[in-house]
């Protein structure tokens, strides 16, 4: 799973959000490292909806414009959970390798 997809699904895990809310949440979750442009976001949302990972929960008109709120589906929650477990295994493997390294490891101390 690509990082933007992971972050979009994570943003929607707690509550439904509209596009701008997703963008803001992704910035917060990534500590400012990932900033989605509208074209990238809406292309990803369409793809994720086609895959059944998210769906439109509701639409509302705000200042003459349609605002769609997206929510994570059960299938999307399962996919996100699987990815979280995969990333956790990879991080554990990396920590093990770093701990086995001789000498000083920044952030982990001395071996």
Image (tube, rainbow, N blue to C red):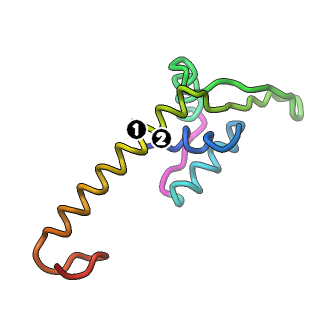
Task: Look at the numbered disc 1 and give the secondary structure of its residue.
Answer: loop
Task: Report the residue marked by disc 2.
Answer: 6
* Span of residues in magenta: 33-38
Q: Give the left or right position of residue 64, taking residue 12 as reference.
A: right
Q: CA distance from mark 1 to mark 2?
A: 6 Å
Question: Where 3 falls versus 71 (above or below)?
Answer: below
Quadrant where the image shows the N terminus: top left
Q: Residue at x 25, y 81 (%)?
A: 109
Image location of residue 51, percent across then percent down: 50, 20
**Toward the viewer: 54 or 37?**
54
Q: Residue furthest right?
A: 63
Q: Quadrant of residue 73?
A: top right
Q: Is residue 36 magenta?
A: yes
> Mark 1 packing: few (<14 Cα in 10 Å), some, or many (20+)?
few
Q: Residue at x 29, y 57 (%)?
A: 92
Question: Where 48 falls versus 104 (above or below)?
Answer: above
Image location of residue 79, percent across then percent down: 46, 32
Task: Report the residue marked by disc 1.
Answer: 2
Task: Look at the numbered disc 2 and give the secondary structure of its residue.
Answer: helix
Tell me, yes or no, whether the two marked residues, 1 and 2, touch with CB atoms within 8 Å: yes
Image location of residue 22, percent across then percent down: 64, 42
């Amino acid at each position: 799973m690509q990082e933007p997809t992971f972050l979009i699904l994570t943003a929607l895990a707690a509550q439904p959000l509209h596009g701008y809310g997703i963008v803001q949440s992704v910035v917060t979750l990534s500590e400012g490292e990932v900033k989605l442009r509208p074209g990238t976001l809406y292309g990803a949302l369409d793809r994720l909806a086609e895959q059944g990972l998210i769906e439109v929960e509701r639409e509302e008109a705000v200042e003459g414009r349609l605002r769609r709120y997206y929510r994570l589906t059960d299938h999307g929650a399962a996919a996100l959970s699987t990815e979280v477990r995969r990333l956790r295994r990879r991080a554990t493997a990396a920590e093990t390798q770093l701990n086995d390294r001789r000498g000083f490891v920044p952030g982990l101390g001395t071996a």
